[in-house]
Image (cartoon, helix red, strand yellow):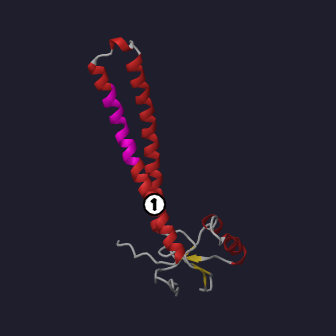
Amino acid sequence: MTTERRCERCGRTLEALRKPVRQLRWSRHWLTGVKSLFTGRLLMCRQCGAIYSTDGNLVAAGAVATDAEHHLDLYRKDMAHLRNAFAGVMIAAGGLAAWLGLGPGPETLQMGQVILIGGLGATASVPFVYFAHKSIRARRDLKALRQARRAGHIPPAPRD
């Protein structure tokens, strides 16, 4: 008969902390992760980030990144990659605009080419600005989640 251990702070089921050195690497609890390699596994709560020893004692509150932080970090990285991809498109559009503007000679530049060059530049910048905004907003939200977790605030449970 196995008994499920629950978090004292939020009541969620505890899970084994895999790769404790990596997950605690940039926190002040990294030494606890190293010690756990020799003394036994640590248990973690994915809702509030608390770490418990194998015997159920609270080691650190809010030391491990929560599930919400992991999901938001992946979203932020995806948006940053899309932003960078569209930055490449903007550079290519700028090169094409320069070629169109300076290629045949400025004296033969017609109004249609000017409109094409302006439209190309504006069209290429729209997705770049959109994904840059999404990335910045996700980074700001992630920072707020991390600060709340470190301050000891327990986020509401996600609805499944």
Residue 56, placed above or below residue 16: below
Magenta portion: prevailing SS class = helix
Horizontal side, residue 104 vs residue 73: left or right: left
Q: Is residue 130 magenta?
A: yes
Q: Which residues are magenta?
A: 117-131
Secondary structure, mark 1, is: helix
User: In the image, what residue type sits under mark 1?
Assistant: Arg
Determine the residue positioned at 46% across, 35% down: 88
Q: Is residue 40 magenta?
A: no
The C terminus: image quadrant: bottom left
Quarter occupied by residue 106 = top left
Which residue is denoted by mark 1 in the rendering? 140
Q: Is residue 120 above or below residue 108?
A: below
Horizontal relation, residue 52 to residue 137: left or right: right
The x, y position of residue 97, in whole percent, is: 39, 25
| Point 30% across, 30% down: residue | 119
Task: Name the residue furthest front.
Answer: 107
Residue found 33% across the figure and 35% down from its top = 122
Query: 10 Å neighbourhood of mark 1: few (<14), some, or many (≥20)?
Result: few
